[in-house]
Image: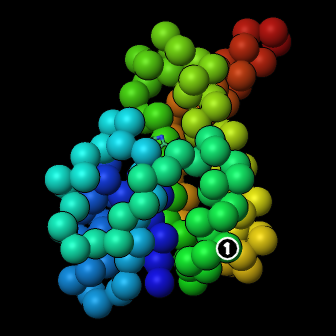
Amino acid sequence: MILVTGGAGYIGSHVVRDLINMNFKVTVMDNLSTGHRSALPPDVDFIEADLLNESLTREILLKIRPQAVIHFAAKSIVSDSVANPLTTFNTNVVGTINLLKAMQLSGTKSLVFFHPPPLSMASRRKHRSRRAMR
Ligand SMILES: NC(=O)c1ccc[n+]([C@@H]2O[C@H](COP(=O)([O-])OP(=O)(O)OC[C@H]3O[C@@H](n4cnc5c(N)ncnc54)[C@H](O)[C@@H]3O)[C@@H](O)[C@H]2O)c1
């Protein structure tokens, strides 16, 4: 079974449909902060949960023990990351760390991870400021 985090979002919901069409068994975990339950087939296994809830994330992974995780749960709007950097950082970094810890405990070794733009922006900014110091 494949766990798709953020599977009710824009990209995740398309991937969930493709996986189901390819006969994979899929479970979606999403807090519906920007995603929509209606974007998914009604019969897909759906868990409404927040990756920032570390103990719940651990509990879920230990219960379902996915073979692999495809991780889309993120704050992906760049302007939001500028307006609310801590909120974005928390979801994209702390949420991902919580997921990785839970995967380690559940023995899930395969992860497909979509690098959220705010993180790439942060590293580009660091790169630019290094250049400015030269
Ligand atoms: N949309 C694009 O064009 C694009 C391009 C390249 C990469 N990406 C990356 O793909 C990923 C998904 O992007 P998207 O456009 O589908 O965004 P989206 O906002 O539509 O989907 C994100 C999903 O994650 C869920 N979510 C957010 N925080 C959560 C949390 N703490 N716990 C559980 N669920 C949570 C949201 O409810 C939503 O369903 C992001 O990492 C994004 O940066 C997107």
Image side of residue 78 versus residue 22, left or right: right
Total numbered labels: 1
Q: Is residue 4 above or below residue 132?
A: below
Q: What's the residue type where badge 1 is placed?
A: Leu
Q: Where, by quadrant of the figure, is residue 26 drawn?
A: bottom left
**Left or right position of 42 against 116:** left
| The quarter of the picture showing ligand 1 | top left
Asked whether 28 or 128 is in front, the reply is 28
Q: Is residue 17 above or below residue 79?
A: below
Image position of 46 (left or right of 97): left
**Residue in view at x 37 percent, y 84 percent:** 25
Q: Give neighbour class at mark 1: few <14, some 14-19, many 20+ (Cα, 10 Å).
A: some
- x and y percent of residue 107 in the render? 73, 79
Q: Residue at x 35, y 72 (%)?
A: 45
Instruction: State the residue position of label 1.
Output: 62
Q: Horizontal and vertical percent for residue 56?
A: 63, 54
Q: Nearer the viewer, residue 69 or 53?
A: 53
Indicate the secondary structure of the residue bearing disc 1: helix
- Give the answer, above or below, for where 45 lies relative to 1: above
Rendering coords of residue 75 (x, y %): 47, 34
Q: Can residue 124 be seen in the rendering of this structure?
A: no
